[in-house]
Image (cartoon, coloured by chain):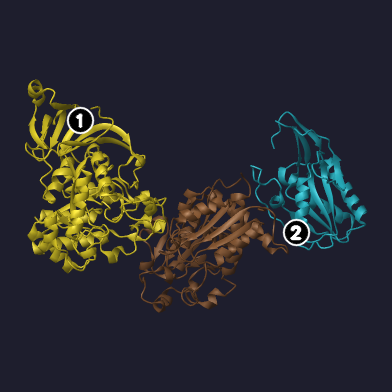
């Protein structure tokens, strides 16, 4: 990742870790344990966060909760308009979602369109009992009536700014950065 | 009206003339050829003579195309005798010989007479019909050669339908020879060509199109040479496309056999590589061949193995060509591009000017026994004027031919017939020529 | 990354990067066919016309399923007699279809080059589903996907293609695709079934099946297409099957982990013995069918899923 002069780090490695620990506790508290609970990470940023949350939860509570990966490309509402088509990733949900409490995990909550697509996709896989949403960053600017159940950090931002969550797994470093738009 | 063509370079290979000469045309004939004609005439006949200043131009005996398909009767939407003649004079041809594969086939006196009448009505180029060898060109029964000859046929061919029966071909060569009629053989062994569409080779393989092997042509060239030798007759091989055919004809000529041959401009201009993309305008029979074949054709032109360049003008309608490749018909509308493509041979040093002109006038005249192809005082005033430097681009929409099927569309050319005089009358004059 | 192409006419026109993109995308689509609800909304509102001038069950069905799983509307137009016989030319058919404004036209035609003609006439994307003996790019892509799935790679593999190469569009497309991806291709068949200058496509040529399959990682047997041969190119099926049928014995010449492929439908006992065709330890013929849907979904998605 090259950083230009207008890049600002808003959360570091420890910050991210503390947020995830808190979210793990909150998920357990809200759902009263891990029974019927599954995690689904949204490609690509949500997948690594979901894996970390899965580890944290298993440290707190005995037992491993199932983890799925969801690629929402095929459900996007802007696919015909978008010029840069993302490379299609694999979806892996190797368990039934029927009657499960699904915690959907993504890195940044912005317009809400990704989450809308993700919920459509999840419903094509089965009939979950409920869907909850966990995000590391909520930057506002919602275009749909969607709200997160678990938020790492509310980060008010302008529309011209870009918020990215860099993670060791893909970027080699844990940090949340805010960049001014060009 | 007298016409003087003044100041041009006159090329007549039959007389070995290549010099600046003036020509006086009078009553449809060539009255005088002289290097100082203009001066001597000017004083006494001023006002009665039209003087056409042609400095920088080349004047040649009227070009003759001995292999044209006029589609009338039967396929007037492709070409009529009149539209074909208009294309001929626009391409610089004063005389054309038309193949018999009309509908009905020109296998009897009435069709021959019909075509000649249509040509007289059109009053553009001289039209010499070729009669069919066999009834309906079916290769079973000989047509009435004698009657056809009396009706005006100058040669015999089942062009498009090769005579597969060797015994019938033998009879045809013998009978035609006794009448002094040339037989023009479309050489294609139908069993070998089968349902082939393009030259059999790398491109037929990758394009998934059935191949026509070169041996389909060569086997029949060899057969016809053997028959002509055995019967001591003559045969003219149409549209030679392969290196093997050139070799067979060369050997036969060396042995003194009465074999003549022609090729068409596309066979020395294009190869089967051009077929990638399935352009049906490139679909011809025989098919476009390999670069080695093109080289051999050029060698054959240089050393005289190939006597004639003929268009194989095969006009078609859009509905015949805008089809899947295998359903499209064979042929190129060639009268209006033939000279332009052939002039490349001079630039490539394959042929000299006199050699090229001979292959497009004197040689076809000799083979068909036409009193044409030379510029002599007293001969018919059939003359082609060529601007050797004129740069132009092929525009199929501007073709006089009804057949717009040309793979040379939009091709840049250099050199063009700018005036075509038939029987002393100007039948075509290019807009570029300021009269 | 996207496919910068209007049409998929043949493997000859596809680059290595494009092939990789299509195969990777197809791998991601495999999972959809395993779901309870085998459908995603990606191509909702798009129209796909399957224009089949030649009988085909599996390819047409595969395209239809692919379109439907992406929520496109698929319409099948089959014409067992050629359009020429019906008096309607391909051009008329194309113009009529174009006026109905579909997004993709999938065409199969017995005439080589027919998709190219169609492509020059209409603005929509064209996918070649097999044209005469020319190309069948979606078959080659699904074959490549199957090889990659089973072998983990294509580069460096020895792949034998045996049978009637001359009449096979599958062979041509696979030769183009597999050689581009770095495989070593050998072809085998009687001389009458090997088209002229085939070696210029970058393949080794054998007349003997045993020589061709020795040491092969993949053996691809072609269907003897009796309907395509106007002139008999071999004396009898009996003689052919005695020398060119893949069976228990000759397959031992190939590598131990050889996989056996066939574009189907199989003439059992002619080009491939039934016990080999049905042996799950080497035959991947049904994987090919499964991958076919994914490859076609990927192409539809890449062609019309993401621009305009």
- Is C160 above or below relative to C105? below
User: Is residue B195 shown to the viewer in this render?
Assistant: yes
Q: Which residue is mark 2?
A: A124
Front in this rendered view, residue B41 or C69? B41
Task: Give how far across and how far down residue A131 sits, in percent.
Answer: 84, 54
Chain identity for the colour yellow used in the image: B
Drawing shade for chain C? brown
- Is C209 above or below relative to A39? below
Q: Mark 2: few, some, or many residues within 10 Å (few <14, many ≥20)?
A: some
Task: Give how far across and how far down residue C244 sits, in percent.
Answer: 43, 73
Asked if the residue under mark 2 is in contact with the one under mark 1, i.e. CB atoms within 8 Å, the reply is no
- Please name the residue shown 11% across and 50% down the image: B369
- Please name the residue shown 80% across and 59% down the image: A66
User: Is residue C182 shown to the viewer in this render?
Assistant: no
Position of C138 compared to B352: left or right?
Answer: right
How far apart marks 1 and 2 lie (CA) works out to 81 Å
Residue C41: which quarter of the image?
Answer: bottom right
Secondary element under disc 1, as helix, strand or loop, is loop
Q: Which residue is mark 1?
A: B57
Drawing shade for chain A? cyan
Front in this rendered view, residue B139 or A114? B139
Position of B398 compared to A121: left or right?
Answer: left
Report the disc number at residue B392.
Answer: none
Which mark is in front, 1 or 2? 1
In which quadrant is the N terminus of chain C drawn?
top right
Front in this rendered view, residue B352 or B4? B4
Task: Give how far across and how far down residue C165 sits, in percent.
Answer: 42, 64
Q: Are marks 1 and 2 on the same chain?
A: no
Q: Mark 1: few, some, or many residues within 10 Å (few <14, many ≥20)?
A: many
In which quadrant is the C terminus of chain C drawn?
top right
């Amino acid at each position: 990742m090259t950083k230009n002069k207008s890049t600002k780090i808003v959360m570091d490695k420890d910050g991210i870790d503390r947020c995830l620990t808190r979210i793990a506790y909150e998920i357990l508290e809200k759902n009263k344990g891990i029974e019927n609970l599954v995690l689904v990470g949204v490609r690509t940023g949500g997948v690594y966060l979901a894996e970390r949350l899965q580890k944290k939860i298993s440290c707190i509570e005995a037992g491993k909760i199932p983890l799925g990966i969801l690629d929402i490309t095929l459900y996007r509402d802007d696919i015909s308009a978008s010029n840069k088509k993302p490379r299609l990733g694999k979806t892996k949900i190797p368990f039934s979602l029927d009657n499960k409490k699904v915690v959907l995990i993504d890195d940044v909550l912005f317009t809400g369109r990704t989450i809308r697509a993700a919920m459509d996709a999840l419903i094509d896989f089965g009939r979950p009992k409920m869907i909850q949403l966990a995000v590391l960053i909520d930057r506002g600017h919602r275009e749909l009536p969607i709200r997160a159940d678990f938020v790492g950090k509310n980060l008010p931002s302008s529309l011209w700014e870009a918020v990215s969550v860099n993670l060791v797994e893909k970027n080699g470093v844990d940090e949340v950065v805010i960049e001014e738009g060009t | 009206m007298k016409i003087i063509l003044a100041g041009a370079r006159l090329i007549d290979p039959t007389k070995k003339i290549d010099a600046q000469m003036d020509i006086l045309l009078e009553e449809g004939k060539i009255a005088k050829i002289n290097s100082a004609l203009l001066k001597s005439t000017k004083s006494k006949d001023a006002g009665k003579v039209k003087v056409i200043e042609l400095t920088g131009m080349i004047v040649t005996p009227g070009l003759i195309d001995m292999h044209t398909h006029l589609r009338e009767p039967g396929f007037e939407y492709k070409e009529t005798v009149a539209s074909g003649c208009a294309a001929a004079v626009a391409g610089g041809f004063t005389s054309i010989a038309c193949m018999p594969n009309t509908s009905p086939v020109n296998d009897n006196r009435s069709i021959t007479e019909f075509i000649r009448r249509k040509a007289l009505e059109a009053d553009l180029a001289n039209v010499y019909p070729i009669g069919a060898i066999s009834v309906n060109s079916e290769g079973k029964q000989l047509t009435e050669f004698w009657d056809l000859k009396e009706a005006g046929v100058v040669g015999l061919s089942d062009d498009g339908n090769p005579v597969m029966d060797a015994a019938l071909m033998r009879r045809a060569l013998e009978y035609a020879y006794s009448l002094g009629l040339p037989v023009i053989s479309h050489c294609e062994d139908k069993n070998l060509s089968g349902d082939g569409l393009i030259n059999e080779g790398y491109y037929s393989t990758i394009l998934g199109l059935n191949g026509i092997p070169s041996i389909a042509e060569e086997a029949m060239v060899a057969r016809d040479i053997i028959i002509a030798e055995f019967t001591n007759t003559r045969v003219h091989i149409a549209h030679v496309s392969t290196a093997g055919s050139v070799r067979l004809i060369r050997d036969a000529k060396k042995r003194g056999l009465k074999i003549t041959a022609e090729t068409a401009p596309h066979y020395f201009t294009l190869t089967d590589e051009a077929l990638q993309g399935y352009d049906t305008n490139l679909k011809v029979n025989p098919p476009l061949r390999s670069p080695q074949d093109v080289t051999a054709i050029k060698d054959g032109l240089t050393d005289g193995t190939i006597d004639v360049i003929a268009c194989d003008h095969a006009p078609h309608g859009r509905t015949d060509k805008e089809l899947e490749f295998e359903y499209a018909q064979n042929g190129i509308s060639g009268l209006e591009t033939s000279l332009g493509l052939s002039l490349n041979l001079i630039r490539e040093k394959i042929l000299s000017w006199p050699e090229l002109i001979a292959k497009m006038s004197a040689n076809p005249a000799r083979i068909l026994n036409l009193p044409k192809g030379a510029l002599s005082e007293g001969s018919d005033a059939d003359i082609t004027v060529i601007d050797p430097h004129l740069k132009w681009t092929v525009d199929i929409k501007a073709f006089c031919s009804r057949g717009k099927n040309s793979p040379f569309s939009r091709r840049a050319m250099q050199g063009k017939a700018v005036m075509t005089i038939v029987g002393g009358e100007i039948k075509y004059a290019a807009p570029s020529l300021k009269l | 990354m996207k496919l910068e192409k209007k049409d998929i006419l043949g493997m000859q026109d596809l680059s290595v990067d494009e092939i990789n993109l299509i195969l990777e995308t197809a791998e991601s689509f495999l999972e959809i066919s395993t779901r309870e609800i085998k459908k995603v909304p990606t191509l909702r509102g798009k129209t796909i016309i399957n224009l089949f001038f030649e009988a085909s069950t599996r390819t047409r069905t595969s395209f239809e399923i692919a379109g439907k799983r992406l929520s496109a509307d698929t319409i099948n137009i089959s014409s067992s007699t050629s359009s020429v016989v019906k008096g309607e030319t391909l051009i008329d058919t194309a113009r009529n279809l174009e006026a109905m404004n579909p997004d993709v036209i999938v065409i199969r035609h017995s005439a080589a080059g027919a998709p190219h003609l169609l492509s020059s006439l209409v603005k929509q994307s064209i996918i070649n589903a097999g044209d005469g003996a020319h190309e069948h790019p979606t078959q080659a892509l699904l074959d490549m996907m199957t090889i990659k799935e089973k072998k983990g790679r294509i580069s460096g593999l020895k792949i034998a293609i045996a049978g009637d190469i001359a009449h096979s569009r599958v062979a041509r497309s696979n030769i183009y695709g597999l050689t581009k991806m770095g495989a070593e291709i050998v072809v085998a068949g009687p001389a009458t079934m090997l088209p002229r200058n085939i070696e210029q496509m970058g393949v080794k040529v054998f007349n003997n099946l045993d020589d061709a399959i020795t040491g092969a990682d993949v053996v691809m047997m072609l269907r003897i297409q009796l309907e395509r041969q106007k002139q008999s190119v071999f004396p009898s099926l009996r003689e052919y099957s005695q020398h060119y049928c893949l069976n228990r014995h000759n397959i031992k010449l190939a590598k131990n982990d050889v996989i056996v492929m066939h574009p189907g439908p199989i003439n059992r006992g002619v080009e491939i013995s039934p016990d080999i065709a049905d042996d799950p330890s080497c035959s991947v013929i049904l994987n090919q069918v499964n991958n076919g849907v994914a490859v076609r979904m990927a192409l539809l998605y890449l062609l019309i899923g993401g621009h305009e």
